[in-house]
Amino acid sequence: MGYSGGIYVAKAGRPAALGGLAVLWEKEFPGGWHELQLDGFPESAALSEVVGETGAPALVAVVLDSDMAHVQALSPAGVGWAAYLHPDNAEAFGAPPLPHTPDEIAGLAVAWSAEAGLNAEPDAVRAALSAKNTFAEETFTELLAALGISSR
């Protein structure tokens, strides 16, 4: 059985908006970015609350049994996007269709990265969004690198 829960990436060590969820582990990246793997699922409004609290872009991956992840990102200016990592598995879980095509999602992700002061690699973003690793968490790590948050 794989991991199920939320993984937050934000410019804050522990945003108050995450409430009482326990942090299983934390990783720090250059530029003040932090990745928090949570024991459980965050409230649906937590992403916008984290962005409001920190005044910086943030993203969350809601992972189901390490098979797929629903990634959502938001910036203070309202640049937002959502994607499924391992979309075939997401479909099998009954996830609803996304409002944007994969190319539109990649473009929004690159715009989000630019607003965050990062340098996303558009081809790497597209590749990460369509990658098929064993675990969705591995694919999320690739996406973070493609967005310019971390190095691989």
Image (cartoon, grey):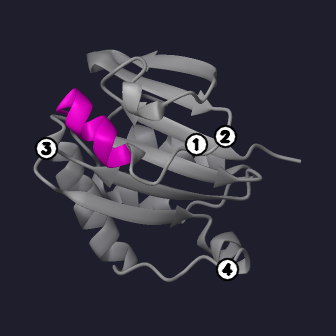
Give the CA separation, mark 2 to mark 3. Answer: 29 Å
Q: Where, by quadrant of the figure, is residue 126 drawn?
A: bottom left
Asked if labels 4 and 2 touch by Cβ distance under 8 angstroms, the answer is: no
| Residue located 26% across and 39% down the image | 51
- Read off the residue under disc 3: 115
Q: Nearer the viewer, residue 65 or 20?
A: 20
Instruction: Decide: is 46 above or below 104.
Output: above
On the rendered structure, is 37 left or right of 117?
A: right
Q: Secondary structure at mark 2?
A: loop
Give the CA separation, mark 1 to mark 2. Answer: 6 Å
Give the number of marks. 4
**Image mark for residue 6:** 1
Residue type for callout 2: Gly
- Read off the residue under disc 2: 40
Give the CA separation, mark 2 to mark 4. Answer: 20 Å
Foreground: disc 1 or disc 2: 2
